[in-house]
């Protein structure tokens, strides 16, 4: 958890950018990502130096070479710990003319550190701004992994609050809910095919650290965690840089965060490669048939991105793999052949586990569309029994564009610090979702009038459209209201008419 002083320091950095003429929040976070990356390289190099000195051996991994670059600048001057002490004009000269070309060179060489730095550029020319930001970043205590990660998450939150490009960031508490529903294990291979800032992958990593602490003490599991567990794809280079930095600062050394247009490229290389998918993909409407991956069109013939992403999830999952994904409501009840085909596949060919209906304001102010979380397991042979439906009506925040917290910070999220009262549950349903999910056997006894209930697969199939909308199966309890008989109502009307007529007669007499 970030302290007030650290939040204040980050706010000051953002204000410095804005007053220095860098006003696009995405540009701010991109420049901060570059600077944090440069700082991170120096930290890794320093650690390797200390290790070599302690073991009296040559350095295993040298990031900054010895000698000078091709322009005659000493590589030592490219290190954060060195140039941070330079005068402002000298600092911007070194950073702009030497450090950034060095980053781009790392990217071209295919270095694990530099993959996303191929087109890195210093995005401003104000020397005083650079000196000020470098000093401010240096003053933030980011020695431990938790603080680094929280600092970066707080920065990413500022993209959302600035009202631009927030579509790249699923609310953190919704991510937390989905990760806890899936409960990742150390054996999982996790993928988000529309990764954005890698929020789902980061949350999965944090869940594993909290629930499987021994994992990082086992050499094989530790190697899998750092090098083979996390896979994120996006076709926005800025998002890839931000996502890769987010993973790095949360302590994942070599995540696979790579460029890919998930709906346009064939998936033969990684079909069936993942055991867990967590995603909230963008739903941009329709794609051109010509640009759509043919292996997805073989699963479902459609141009709609939301259905193509569902086909993609089924393609990427291995048999027995699980998924928790956000879909727009139309996927649950759309009437086209492609809509019905996807739902039929989920119910009859795989194992549909749950539908969690989200309130329509969850993704405001960026989108007001109604969505749901779909939880399923890829089997290829069916297996759907009872499907669990939950009607989430509150997520702890107001459902307007302001998204104001409705409870104290300790009572927000899927795993709050304190238990919620019934009144507080009405403002934050997330802990209740996890409680009921953990005891699904008891859900079979709940009536269809409750907030959650079970629906047998046979009943869903019997609709003929495999309808998955919660309201299709919910029963509404109508309160009994006593109405007067028609004769009594007519008698009352006649009495009123007589009163009106008498009143009019008296008025005429007074005026006459």
Image (cartoon, rainbow, N blue to C red):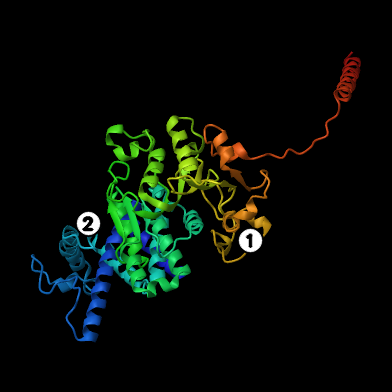
Quarter of the picture containing the C terminus is: top right
Q: Quadrant of residue 276?
A: bottom left
Foreground tag (1 vs 2): 1
Measuring from the top left, give residue 257's x and y in whole percent: 30, 56
- State left or right for residue 133 relative to residue 2: left
Residue ID for mark 1: 420
- State left or right for residue 1 relative to residue 432: left
Q: Is residue 86 visible?
A: yes
The one of 334 and 236 positioned closer to us in this rendering: 334
Residue shown at the point (58%, 58%) measured from the top left: 438
**Distance between the alpha carbons at the discs numbered 1 and 2:** 47 Å
Residue shown at the point (41%, 49%) measured from the top left: 166
Say how many tags the image has.
2
Measuring from the top left, give residue 286's x and y in whole percent: 36, 34
Q: Quadrant of residue 471?
A: top right
- Pointer 1 or 2: first along the chain: 2
Residue shown at the point (22%, 56%) measured from the top left: 120
Residue ID for mark 2: 120
Q: Residue furthest top?
A: 512
The one of 479 and 91 positioned closer to us in this rendering: 479
Secondary structure of the residue carrying tag 1 is: loop
Residue shown at the point (68%, 57%) measured from the top left: 422
Q: Quadrant of residue 91?
A: bottom left
Position of residue 114 relative to residue 510, above or below, is below
- State left or right for residue 74 relative to residue 364: left
Do callouts 1 and 2 mark residues in contact (Cβ within 8 Å)? no
Secondary structure of the residue carrying tag 2 is: loop
The one of 289 and 270 positioned closer to us in this rendering: 270
Position of residue 302 relative to residue 436, above or below, is above
- State left or right for residue 351 relative to residue 304: right
């Amino acid at each position: 958890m970030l302290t007030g002083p650290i939040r204040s320091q980050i706010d000051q950095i953002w204000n410095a950018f804005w007053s220095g003429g860098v006003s696009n929040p995405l540009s701010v976070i991109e420049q901060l990502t570059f600077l944090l990356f440069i700082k991170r390289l120096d930290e890794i190099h320093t650690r390797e130096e200390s290790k070599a000195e302690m073991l009296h051996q040559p350095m295993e991994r040298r990031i900054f070479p010895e000698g000078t670059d091709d322009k005659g600048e000493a590589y030592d001057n490219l290190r954060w710990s060195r140039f941070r002490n330079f005068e402002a004009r000298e600092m911007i000269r070194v950073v702009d003319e030497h450090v950034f070309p060095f980053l781009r060179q790392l990217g071209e060489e295919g270095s694990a550190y530099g993959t996303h730095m191929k087109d890195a550029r210093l995005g401003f020319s104000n020397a005083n701004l650079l000196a000020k930001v470098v000093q401010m970043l240096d003053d933030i205590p980011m020695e431990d992994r938790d603080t680094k990660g929280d600092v970066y998450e707080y920065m990413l939150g500022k993209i959302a609050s600035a009202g631009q490009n927030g579509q790249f960031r699923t609310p953190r508490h919704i991510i937390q809910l989905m990760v806890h529903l899936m409960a990742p294990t150390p054996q999982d291979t996790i993928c988000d095919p529309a990764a954005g800032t890698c929020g789902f992958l980061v949350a999965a990593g944090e869940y594993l650290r909290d629930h499987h602490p021994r994992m990082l003490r086992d050499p094989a599991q530790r190697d899998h965690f750092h090098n083979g567990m996390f896979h994120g794809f996006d076709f926005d280079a800025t998002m890839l840089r931000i996502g890769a930095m987010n993973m790095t600062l949360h302590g994942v050394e070599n995540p696979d965060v790579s460029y890919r247009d998930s709906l346009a490229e064939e998936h033969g290389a990684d079909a069936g490669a993942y055991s867990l998918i967590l995603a909230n993909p963008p739903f941009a409407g329709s794609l051109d048939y010509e640009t759509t991956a043919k292996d997805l069109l073989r699963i479902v013939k459609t141009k709609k991105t939301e259905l193509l992403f569902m086909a993609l999830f089924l393609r990427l999952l291995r048999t027995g793999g699980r998924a928790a994904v956000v879909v727009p409501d139309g996927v649950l009840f759309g009437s086209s052949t492609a809509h019905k085909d996807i739902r039929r596949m989920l119910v009859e060919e795989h194992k549909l586990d749950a539908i969690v209906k989200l309130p329509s304001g969850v993704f405001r102010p960026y989108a007001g569309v109604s969505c749901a979380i779909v939880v399923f397991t890829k089997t290829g042979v069916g297996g759907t029994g009872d499907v669990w439906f939950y009607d989430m009506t509150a997520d702890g925040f107001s459902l307007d564009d302001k998204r104001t917290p409705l409870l104290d910070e300790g009572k927000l999220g899927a795993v709050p610090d304190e238990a919620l009262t019934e009144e507080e549950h009405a403002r934050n349903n997330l802990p209740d979702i996890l409680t009921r999910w953990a005891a699904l056997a008891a859900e079979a006894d709940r009536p269809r009038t409750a907030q959650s209930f079970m629906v047998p697969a046979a009943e869903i199939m019997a609709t003929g459209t495999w309808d998955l909308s919660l309201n299709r199966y919910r029963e509404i309890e109508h309160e009994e209201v006593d109405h007067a008989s028609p004769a009594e109502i007519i008698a009352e009307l006649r009495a009123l008419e007589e009163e009106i007529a008498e009143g009019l007669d008296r008025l005429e007499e007074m005026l006459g």
